[in-house]
Image (cartoon, rainbow, N blue to C red):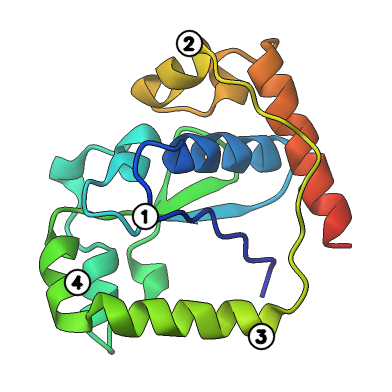
C-alpha cells in the first residue's frame, strides 16, 4: 500500500478540493500514482478532475454501503497521467445517513491517533485566480498553468510531502 494523505477540514470553502486536485496533480507530474477519493456528496473533486457525473454508474457511496463492491471497481482515470479518482455523486448524501457521521468521525480520529506524529509543511500556497480556474477545466494547476507560481508551489509541496514520507 502507498502513502495516504488526507485533506480534511469540517469548514466549507477553505480550499480542500482545490488543494487535493493540485497536490494530486503535482505528485502525479513527479511520476507518482495518485488516487483521489471524493468523499463529498457535492462531487466537486470528481467534476474538478474532469469526470462527467452523468457517466458515473458506481461511486464511493456504493463502495461504502455494499461490502461486496471493491474500491478498485469504481476508480476512473482522469485527463492527467497517473491521477485517478474514486468518484462521488449525490448518492453519498443518503449513504451518510446509513453510515452515520459519528461512526465515520470516530474511526477517522482513531486512524489519526494510530498514525502518531503529524507533519506540518513549510510550503505556502497563495490563492490565485488560476488556481480557481484549473478545476473548471478539469485539470490540476500544474497542467492548466504549469509556469504559474501556484503550480510551482504545489510542486514544491509535493516534493516536501515525498521527502517527509521517505
Whether the residues at callouts 1 and 2 have beta carbons within 8 Å, the answer is no
Give the spatial CA distance, label 4 vs label 1: 13 Å
* Residue sitting at x 57%, y 34%: 22
Q: Residues within 10 Å of mark 4 (few under 14, many from 20)?
A: some
Mark 1 — residue? 38
Give the spatial CA distance, label 3 vs label 4: 24 Å
What is the x, y in percent for residue 146? Answer: 66, 15
Mark 4 — residue? 96
Instruction: Relative to 130, say whether 68 is above or below.
Output: below
**Viewer-side residue, 109 vs 63:** 109
Instruction: Relative to 26, say whether 115 is above or below.
Output: below
| Element type at mark 4 | helix
| Element type at mark 2 | helix
What is the x, y in percent for residue 31? Answer: 74, 43
Residue 66 seen = yes
Q: Quadrant of residue 6?
A: bottom right
Whether the residues at callouts 4 and 2 have beta carbons within 8 Å, the answer is no
What is the x, y in percent for residue 35? Answer: 52, 56
First along the sequence among labels 3 and 4: 4
Name the side, left or right, on which 16 lies relative to 86: right
Mark 3 — residue? 114
* Residue sitting at x 82%, y 44%: 160
Look at the image and tell me in which quarter the N terminus lies: bottom right
First along the sequence among labels 1 and 2: 1
**Viewer-side residue, 96 vs 117:** 117
Q: Residues within 10 Å of mark 1 (few under 14, many from 20)?
A: many
Name the side, left or right, on which 14 lies relative to 95: right
Amino acid at each position: 500500500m502507498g502513502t495516504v494523505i488526507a485533506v480534511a477540514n469540517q469548514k466549507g470553502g477553505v480550499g480542500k478540493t482545490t488543494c487535493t486536485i493540485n497536490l494530486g496533480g503535482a505528485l502525479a507530474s513527479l511520476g507518482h500514482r495518485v488516487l483521489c477519493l471524493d468523499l463529498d456528496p457535492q462531487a466537486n473533486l470528481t467534476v474538478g478532475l474532469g469526470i462527467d457525473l452523468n457517466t458515473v454508474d458506481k461511486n464511493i457511496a456504493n463502495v461504502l454501503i455494499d461490502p461486496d463492491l471493491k474500491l478498485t471497481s469504481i476508480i476512473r482515470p482522469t485527463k492527467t497521467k497517473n491521477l485517478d479518482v474514486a468518484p462521488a455523486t449525490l448518492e453519498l448524501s443518503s449513504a451518510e445517513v446509513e453510515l452515520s457521521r459519528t461512526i465515520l468521525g470516530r474511526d477517522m480520529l482513531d486512524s489519526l491517533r494510530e498514525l502518531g506524529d503529524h507533519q506540518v509543511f513549510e510550503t505556502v500556497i497563495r490563492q490565485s485566480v488560476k488556481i480557481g480556474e484549473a478545476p473548471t477545466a478539469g485539470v490540476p494547476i500544474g497542467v492548466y498553468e504549469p509556469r504559474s507560481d501556484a503550480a510551482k508551489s504545489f510542486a514544491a509541496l509535493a516534493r516536501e510531502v515525498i521527502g517527509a514520507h521517505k
